[in-house]
Image: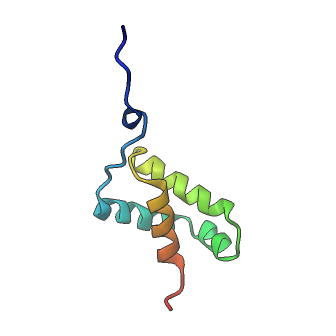
Amino acid sequence: MPRRKEPEEFIPKFEEEPENLEAIVDEVINNNTSALLEIQGGLRSSLTKLISEVMRKSGGKADPHKIRRLILDKISPPE
């Protein structure tokens, strides 16, 4: 009888180092100024584009929710 897999085996593990992830996010933001302006103007599809680019550059290892937070933190004006 085949072994039953645990749910954790199906959930992707995101193991990207935070320092490396921040560098990738910075690179993607710096290379996509038009998308940055669109996001600041309210166009959320451009945010998805940037998240996808970071995921691609990280080899799919980074957590997309963390990427989203990093991007928004970096492009939001300081309070």
Task: In this rendered view, identify the residue nearer to me: 17 or 8.
Answer: 8
Q: Left of 43 or right of it: where is 26? A: left
Q: Which colour scheme appears in the figure?
A: rainbow
**Residue 51's spot in the image, x, y percent?**
53, 57
Seen from the viewer's position, the closer of residues 63 and 7 is 7
Which residue is painted at 37% across and 33% down in the image?
A: 9
Q: Give the x, y percent position of residue 47.
A: 60, 63
Pick the front one: 62 or 59: 62
Q: How many marks?
A: 0
Give the quadrant of the N terminus: top left
Q: Is residue 24 above or below residue 14?
A: below
Residue 71 position (above or below residue 62): below
Identified at 42% across, 68% down, the residue is 26
In the rendered structure, the answer to whether residue 76 lies left or right of residue 63 reads right
Percent x, y of residue 52: 54, 52
Q: Residue at x 55, y 59 (%)?
A: 50
